Image (spheres, rainbow, N blue to C red):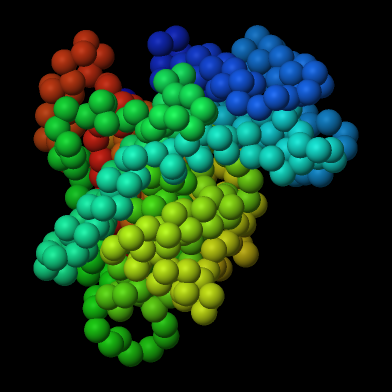
C-alpha cells in the first residue's frame, strides 16, 4: 500500500478490484432495476440501453448539447471524454454515471418524466418497511436510559444506519414495496461489530452541553443515504438540539438523486414525516424536528457540489465559507469519506488529521467501510483486521460494510 505522498488515485481498471466490480457489475444491475421500476417509454428504454453499452464497453461522452449543466460537466470532464470508463478516477466515473442515468430517464426534462426520482420506489419500500418500525420503537426503550448512554446510542444509530445503503444492495432487492429493502444485516457477524477507530469522546468534547458564551453553536451534517440512515441522523440532530449541544443544525442533502439512496430534500421531508407520524418518542422527535425546520434551528441545504465528482479539498469557496465557524461538521457515510480524505489507496495508517486539514473547521466522519479507502488506523488494528479477514485477500473488511468508524479532526 502506497505512502501518503504518492498514494494512487483509485481507478476501475485493476482486475478483481472493488472499484471495477462497481462499474462492471453493480452499474449494469442498477440500470436493469431502474428499468423494471417504471413503465418507461420506448425512448427511455433506448436511452437506458445506450447507457448500458457506453458504460460497460464504450468511452465517456460529453453530455448532450441541451443539457442544463453541459458547460459544468464539460469543464469537469475535459480530460476524461473519449477514454474508457475504467481508466478514469473511480470517484469521477461513478458520479458521471449517476448524472447520465438521470439523463436517460428524463429526470432533467423537458418532458413528462422531469423530476421523477428513478430510485424513489426503492427508497419508499425501505421507508415503509417493518425494519424502520422496529428501529423507531426502540427509541421508546432508549428514552428510559441515562442521557450519556442515549447520546452514545444516537451516535451509533447514525453511524450504523450507514449500512443501509441501497446502492450496496443493488441486485438483492425489488421496488415492489412488499419487502424491506435493507438486506445489509446479514453482512455482519457481530452486531454491531467493534469500531476500527473510535474518537467519540473527542466528538462529544467539541459539543459540550450547557451555556457557552459567544456565537451560536452550529453543527453541520453532510447527509448520506435516506431512509434507514437519515432517520437515525435526524434522531441524532434532534438530540443535539434538545440537549443544547447545538443551537442550530444545517443538514446538507443532494440536489438530485444520486448513488441510489442518497438523501434529497424530498427524502428529508419524507423521513421527517415518517418520524413525526410515528407514536412514542420517535413521533415526539419528529414533531420537534418539524418545528425546528419551521423556526430555522434546522436548515436543509442542497449545494450542487454535493453531486460533484471531486474530493472536498476542491470545494468551492462559497461552500467552504458555510462550514467556517461551525462547532463541528459531521460527514456521513462511505462516499463522503472518500471525498473527505481523497479517493486514493492510502496507507491505512496515514494521518486522518493530515488528510482532512483542508476541511474548514472540526470534522467528524461516521462511516461504515464500503470501499478501499481507509486512513487513520493504528498499526495493530490493521494487523488484527488483516489477520481476521481469513478470506485469502485480507481486504473484505474494507469493502463489506461490516466495520465502522468514528474519526474526528479538531
Ligand atoms: O456513501 P455510502 O452510501 O456509504 O456508500 C456508497 C457506496 O456504496 O457506493 C460506492 C459503490 O457504488 C462505494 O464506494 C460506497 O461504498
Residue 69 position, x and y percent, is 77, 43
Q: Quadrant of the C terminus?
A: bottom left
Along the viewing direction, whichever of 187 and 123 lies nearer the viewer: 123
Report whether 237 appears left or right of 307: left
Q: Is residue 231 above or below residue 193?
A: below
Residue 361 position, x and y percent, is 41, 66
Report whether 334 appears left or right of 75: left
Q: Is residue 233 visible?
A: no
Q: Is residue 254 above or below residue 377?
A: below
Q: Quadrant of the N terminus?
A: top left
Residue 318 position, x and y percent, is 62, 64
Quarter of the view holding residue 48: top right
Q: Is residue 187 visible?
A: yes
Q: Is residue 280 above or below residue 190?
A: below
Question: Residue lying farthest bottom?
Answer: 213
Looking at the image, which residue is at 50% across and 14% down? 25
Report whether 406 appears left or right of 102: left
How many marks are shown on the rendered structure? Answer: 0
Amino acid at each position: 500500500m502506497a505512502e501518503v505522498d504518492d498514494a494512487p488515485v483509485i481507478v476501475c481498471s485493476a482486475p478483481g478490484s472493488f472499484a471495477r466490480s462497481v462499474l462492471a457489475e453493480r452499474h449494469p444491475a442498477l440500470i436493469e432495476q431502474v428499468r423494471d421500476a417504471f413503465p418507461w417509454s420506448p425512448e427511455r428504454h433506448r436511452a437506458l440501453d445506450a447507457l448500458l453499452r457506453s458504460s460497460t464497453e464504450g468511452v465517456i461522452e460529453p453530455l448532450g448539447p441541451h443539457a442544463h449543466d453541459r458547460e459544468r460537466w464539460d469543464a469537469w470532464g475535459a480530460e476524461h471524454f473519449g477514454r474508457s470508463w475504467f481508466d478514469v478516477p473511480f470517484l469521477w466515473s461513478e458520479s458521471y454515471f449517476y448524472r447520465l442515468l438521470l439523463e436517460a430517464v428524463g429526470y432533467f426534462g423537458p418532458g413528462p418524466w422531469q423530476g421523477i426520482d428513478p430510485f424513489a420506489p426503492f427508497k419508499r419500500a425501505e421507508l415503509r418497511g417493518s425494519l424502520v418500525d422496529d428501529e423507531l420503537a426502540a427509541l421508546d426503550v432508549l428514552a428510559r436510559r441515562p442521557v450519556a448512554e442515549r447520546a452514545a446510542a444516537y451516535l451509533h444509530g447514525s453511524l450504523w444506519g450507514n449500512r443501509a445503503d441501497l446502492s450496496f444492495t443493488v441486485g438483492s432487492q425489488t421496488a415492489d414495496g412488499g419487502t424491506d429493502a435493507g438486506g445489509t444485516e446479514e453482512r455482519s457477524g457481530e452486531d454491531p461489530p467493534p469500531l476500527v477507530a473510535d474518537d467519540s469522546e473527542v466528538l462529544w468534547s467539541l459539543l459540550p452541553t450547557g451555556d457557552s458564551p459567544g456565537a451560536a453553536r452550529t453543527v453541520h451534517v453532510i447527509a448520506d443515504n435516506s431512509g434507514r440512515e437519515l432517520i437515525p441522523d435526524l434522531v441524532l440532530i434532534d438530540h443535539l438540539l434538545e440537549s443544547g449541544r447545538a443551537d442550530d443544525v444545517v443538514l446538507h442533502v443532494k440536489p438530485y438523486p444520486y448513488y441510489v439512496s442518497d438523501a434529497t430534500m424530498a427524502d428529508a421531508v419524507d423521513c421527517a414525516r415518517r418520524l413525526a407520524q410515528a407514536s412514542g418518542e420517535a413521533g415526539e422527535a419528529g414533531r420537534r424536528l418539524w418545528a425546528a425546520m419551521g423556526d430555522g434551528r434546522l436548515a436543509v441545504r442542497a449545494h450542487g457540489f454535493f453531486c460533484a465528482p471531486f474530493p472536498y479539498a476542491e470545494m468551492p469557496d462559497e461552500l467552504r465559507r458555510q462550514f467556517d465557524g461551525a462547532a463541528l461538521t459531521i460527514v456521513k457515510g462511505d462516499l463522503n469519506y472518500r471525498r473527505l480524505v481523497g479517493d486514493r489507496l492510502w496507507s491505512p495508517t496515514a494521518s486522518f488529521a493530515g488528510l482532512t486539514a483542508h476541511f474548514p473547521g472540526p470534522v467528524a466522519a461516521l462511516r461504515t467501510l464500503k470501499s478501499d479507502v481507509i486512513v487513520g488506523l493504528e498499526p495493530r488494528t490493521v494487523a488484527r483486521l488483516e489477520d481476521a479477514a481469513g478470506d485469502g485477500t485480507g481486504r473484505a473488511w474494507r469493502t463489506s460494510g461490516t466495520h465502522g468508524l468514528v474519526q474526528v479532526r479538531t
